[in-house]
Amino acid sequence: MGSVGAKDVPQLLDANGKRIDGRGLEELRPLKIEAGVLTRANGSAYVEWGENKVMAAVYGPREVHPRHMQENTKAVVQCRYNMASFSVDERKKPGLDRRSQEISKVISEAFESVLFVEEYPRTSIGIYIEILQANAGTRCAGIVAASVALADAGIPMSDLVPAIAVGKVGGKLAVDLRKEEDNYGEADMPMALVPKSGRLVLLQMEGHMTAPEMAQALEMGVRGCQQVYEVQKDALKRRYAIQRPTEAV
Ligand code: ADP
């Protein structure tokens, strides 16, 4: 939500209701996912979603560091979301700032609710999300990548976790906001869903919308998540097919 003069605000919807990149209100940016891209992680995935480029690596279950974080009854889920300095227009100061810490925390909590953490007491499941190129929606892209990486690592979980941001631009609700829409739109609401149970495991909002609009935005987000879910499952199917090439012989 930028604070600029009205004359600087780009027109986010044209006369035909098309968005700044020509998309319809419920149209996602192109999404590509590849599972198993890193050899030294237990699981990994690379996601390109519009101009976002995100890598996720998963390690574990393994020993907890630092030791005092260990829990006797369950695995601890340790997520680190990091935005590379070169991922944004103006070089970002390296390191974990407050925003990254908050995002890391909410993503850890989202995954803790789908992973069978009680099966791995006194261990840690490490989820590393690296934002290589950012264009709004990076926490969602990170969750999408991390779920596929967790599945690639073979860590038992109840479901994959698709995610998407729904927002309000030019007075209309729209899914999967890009940077200009995030900056100059009226609202941005990232959410993550567990499709099998219909549970939301992450929901945040910046800006403002009415309660009826929010109800509609949630429905649009669920539909968007279903589309993302299909791409996630397809990435895992392709990964499985690559691992067993002899079956075709
Ligand atoms: P998300 O990426 O999940 O939408 P935000 O709404 O906080 O998270 O950020 C929106 C976009 O703003 C990011 O995707 C990125 O393009 C840009 N951005 C975020 N933080 C910074 C930063 N520290 N420096 C420059 N650009 C940033």
Image (cartoon, rainbow, N blue to C red):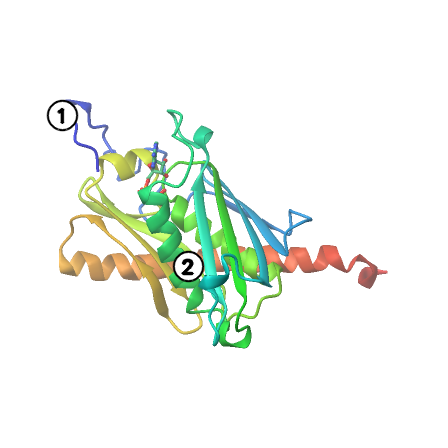
Q: Where ligand 1 lies, by image quadrant?
A: top left
| Residue 145 rendering spot, x and y as whole percentages | 51, 51
Side (left or right) of 70 relative to 178: right
Please tell me which residue is depicted at 59% across the width and 52% down the height of the picture.
44
Mark 2: amino acid: Ser
Residue 234 in which image quadrant:
bottom right
**Label number found at residue 5:** 1
Question: Which is more foreground, mark 1 or mark 2?
Answer: 2
Disc 1 residue crowd, few under 14, some 14–19, many 20+, Cα 10 Å: few
Q: Would you say residue 224 is visible in this rendering?
A: no
| Residue 56 rendering spot, x and y as whole percentages | 53, 49
Read off the residue under disc 2. Answer: 108
Q: Under tag 1, what secondary structure? A: loop
Side (left or right) of 10 relative to 103: left
| Residue 54 rendering spot, x and y as whole percentages | 50, 42
| Residue 179 rendering spot, x and y as whole percentages | 33, 35
Q: Nearer the viewer, residue 75 or 43?
A: 75
Q: Under tag 2, what secondary structure? A: helix
Vertically, is 235 above or below 68? above
Mark 1: amino acid: Gly
Please tell me which residue is depicted at 29% across the width and 62% down the height of the picture.
219
